[in-house]
Image (cartoon, rainbow, N blue to C red):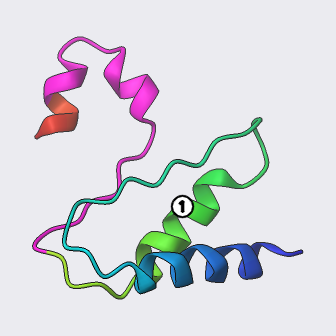
Amino acid sequence: MGVDSRIQDVVQLLNCHKSKDPLLLGIWGMGGIRKTTIAKAVYNEIRRDFDAKSFLLNVREVWEQDNGEVSLQQ
């Protein structure tokens, strides 16, 4: 099963969710399994109407910095 099929599976799940409620998608696993690649591709592919959307990269590293929580919220 390649990365493209995994991306399409996630996109399909998100696109069929009709609620206007916020969605949170978590991707976890050991380093080097292309989690960030999949997350960014899904972010670019989703076809829902959003008031806003954002992609936060390196959340853990930013959070641990001085003022990191505020930086992520902004």
Does 59 lie within the magenta span? yes
Mark 1 lies on residue = 39
Vertical comparison of 20 with 25: above or below: below
43 to the left or right of 6:
left
Expressed as whole percent of the image width and height from the top left, the position of residue 49 reads 20, 84
Q: Helix, strand or loop at disc 1?
A: helix
Tell me the quadrant of the picture where the N terminus can be found.
bottom right
Q: Nearer the viewer, residue 9 or 2?
A: 9
46 to the left or right of 50:
right
Query: Residue, x 72% and y 73% (percent of image)?
Result: 6
Residues drawn in magenta = 51-70
Expressed as whole percent of the image width and height from the top left, the position of residue 48 reads 29, 84
42 to the left or right of 15:
right
Query: Residue, x 44% and y 26% (percent of image)?
Result: 60
Query: Residue, x 24% and y 22% (percent of image)?
Result: 68
* Magenta stretch: helix, strand or loop mostly: loop
Tell me the quadrant of the picture where the C terminus can be found.
top left
Expressed as whole percent of the image width and height from the top left, the position of residue 12 reads 54, 84
Query: Residue, x 22% and y 35% (percent of image)?
Result: 72
Picture quadrant where residue 31 is located: top right
What amino acid type should be assigned to the residue bearing mark 1? Ala
Expressed as whole percent of the image width and height from the top left, the position of residue 61 reads 44, 24
Vertical comparison of 18 with 25: above or below: below
